[in-house]
Amino acid sequence: MQENVYSVSGMTCSHCANAVRSEITRIPGVREVTVDVDAGLVTVEADDQPDRGAIRAAVEEAGYQLVG
């Protein structure tokens, strides 16, 4: 199991967290997504290292930006 933490900008509320969580959980192999809106962090637990491009695309689909 791999755990990765990503910085996401633009999230301000639980709706934001739910949107990001919903998009990222669609990525194959992702097991759990935890969103800390106050810190702007998203923790992704997956079977293998998730593709950063897929994470970026999911975050952007939710309407936010992956930092870095």
Image (cartoon, rainbow, N blue to C red):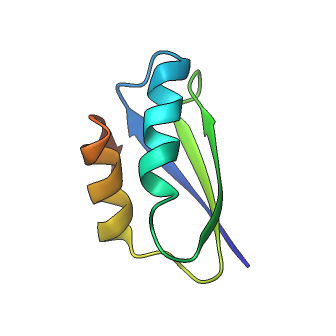
State the image quarter where residue 42 is shown.
top right
* Residue extending furthest toward the right: 1
Q: Residue at x 29, y 69 (%)?
A: 53
Image coordinates for residue 32, horizontal then vertical, percent: 67, 57
Taking depth in this image into account, of 33 and 43 the one nearest to the observer is 33
Q: How many marks?
A: 0
- When the figure is inspected, residue 16 is found, relative to residue 24, above or below; the finding is above
Q: Is 35 placed left or right of 8 in the picture?
A: right
Q: Residue at x 34, y 54 (%)?
A: 58
| Location of the N terminus (image quadrant) | bottom right
State the image quarter where residue 41 is shown.
top right
Image coordinates for residue 51, horizontal then vertical, percent: 40, 76
Q: Is 66 placed left or right of 6 in the picture?
A: left
Image coordinates for residue 35, horizontal then vertical, percent: 60, 38
State the image quarter where residue 29 is shown.
bottom right
* Residue extending furthest toward the top: 13
Taking depth in this image into account, of 23 and 6 the one nearest to the observer is 23
Q: Residue at x 45, y 26 (%)?
A: 16
- When the figure is inspected, residue 65 is found, relative to residue 25, above or below; the finding is above
Image coordinates for residue 46, horizontal then vertical, percent: 63, 72
